[in-house]
Amino acid sequence: MPNAFVHVELNTTEVAHAKDFYGQLFEWTLEEIPMGESVYTLIKVGKGTGGGIMKHPVPGAPSSWLAYVEVSDIHAATKKAASLGATIVRDVTEVMNMGWLSIIVDPTGAALGLWQSKT
């Protein structure tokens, strides 16, 4: 399926509590990945779409889940989203050696991540 959901990320105000809760609830395997001065926790589910847990990057914002959709050209997809009325919350950003992401808010107010893998 083109443009499949490929990643789901929890941006949370309480990383340790969220990891404990979801780890126990679903028995997910969680792997911490150092990212500069912060840590990103990969959620390895074995089957289906995996995800991650991280400290919410927006001070004062509530904890929330963010889905990512795979695109073949992150720059073109981000630009197209803007032309269709989306607000670009985070422009195209490289993520280590894995790929690129951008985050948009659609015209109805819903946030969505776009992802292009390097491989």
Image (tube, grey):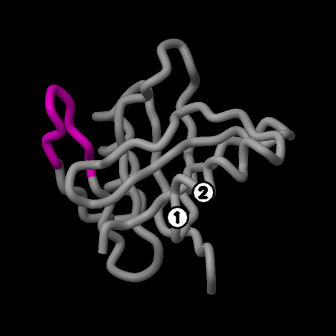
Asked if residue 66 is positioned above or below residue 31 in the image, the reply reads: above
Magenta residues span 33-41
Q: Within 10 Å of the Cα at label 1, are there few (<14), some (14-19), or many (20+) other Cα atoms?
A: few
**Front residue of this view, candidates 96 and 83:** 83
Name, please, the residue furthest toward the top.
60
Tell me the amino acid under the disc marked 2: Ala
Q: In the picture, which quadrant includes the N terminus?
A: bottom right
* Residue at 31 percent of width and 67 percent of height: 118
Residue 116: percent from left, percent from top: 44, 63
Q: Which residue is mark 2?
A: 76
**Front residue of this view, candidates 2 and 49:** 2
Asked if residue 27 is positioned above or below residue 111 in the image, the reply reads: below
Tag 1 near tag 2, CB within 8 Å:
yes
52 relative position to 65: left or right? left
Residue 90: percent from left, percent from top: 52, 34
**Front residue of this view, candidates 92 and 26:** 92
* Residue at 52 percent of width and 71 percent of height: 72
Tell me the amino acid under the disc marked 1: Asp
The answer to which image quadrant residue 82 occupies is top right
Q: Main secondary structure of the magenta part?
A: strand
Q: Which residue is mark 1?
A: 73
87 relative position to 16: left or right? right
Name, please, the residue furthest toward the bottom.
1
Residue 97: percent from left, percent from top: 20, 57
Total labels: the figure holds 2
Q: Within 10 Å of the Cα at label 2, are there few (<14), some (14-19), or many (20+) other Cα atoms?
A: few
* Residue at 27 percent of width and 60 percent of height: 98
**Mark 1 residue element:** loop
* Residue at 35 percent of width and 72 percent of height: 45
